[in-house]
Image (cartoon, rainbow, N blue to C red):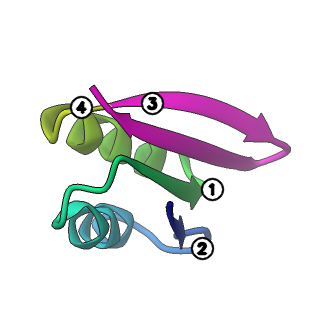
Amino acid sequence: MKEIDARGLSCPQPVILLKQALADQPQTCKIWVDHPTARENTLRFAAHAGYKADILEQGGDVCLTLSKK
């Protein structure tokens, strides 16, 4: 499983990192973000790329665990 820590990064950096991680189409990928805009944009990109997301919120951080549909 690939894991990305995009906390502290503003858009579009989290989406760019996610795009790079999903380039070889892993079965699962995990990305951490800490901003609502980054959360929504990465969720939108993941859905477009064919992944569903499980969302875990911990304080101000959000962990999106993505798995291939």
Q: Amino acid at mark 3?
A: Ala
Residue 47's tag is: 4
Is residue 66 part of the magenta span, yes or no?
A: yes
| Quarter of the image with the C terminus in it | top left
Residue 28 x %, y %? 43, 48
Give SS at disc 4: helix
Residue 60 left/right relative to 29? right
Q: Amino acid at mark 4?
A: Ala
Q: Nearer the viewer, mark 3 or mark 2?
A: 3
Query: For mark 1, does the 10 Å Cα neighbourhood hold few (<14), some (14 to 19), or many (20 or more) residues?
Result: many
Q: Nearer the viewer, mark 2 or mark 4?
A: 4
- Give the labeled residue for mark 1: 34
Q: Earlier in the sequence, mark 4 or mark 1?
A: 1
Query: For mark 4, does the 10 Å Cα neighbourhood hold few (<14), some (14 to 19), or many (20 or more) residues?
Result: some
Could you tell me if the residues under marks 1 and 2 are in contact, i.e. CB atoms within 8 Å? yes
Residue 1 x %, y %? 50, 60
Mark pair 3, 1: CA separation: 16 Å
Query: For mark 3, does the 10 Å Cα neighbourhood hold few (<14), some (14 to 19), or many (20 or more) residues?
Result: many
Mark pair 1, 2: CA separation: 7 Å
Q: Nearer the viewer, mark 3 or mark 1?
A: 3
Boundaries of the magenta span: 52-69
Q: Amino acid at mark 1?
A: Asp
Could you tell me if the residues under marks 2 and 4 are in contact, i.e. CB atoms within 8 Å? no
* Residue 55 sits in quarter: top right
Residue 19 left/right relative to 33? left
Residue 40 left/right relative to 2? left
Could you tell me if the residues under marks 4 and 3 are in contact, i.e. CB atoms within 8 Å? yes
Residue 53's tag is: 3
Mark pair 3, 2: CA separation: 21 Å
Q: Earlier in the sequence, mark 2 or mark 4?
A: 2
- Give the labeled residue for mark 2: 8
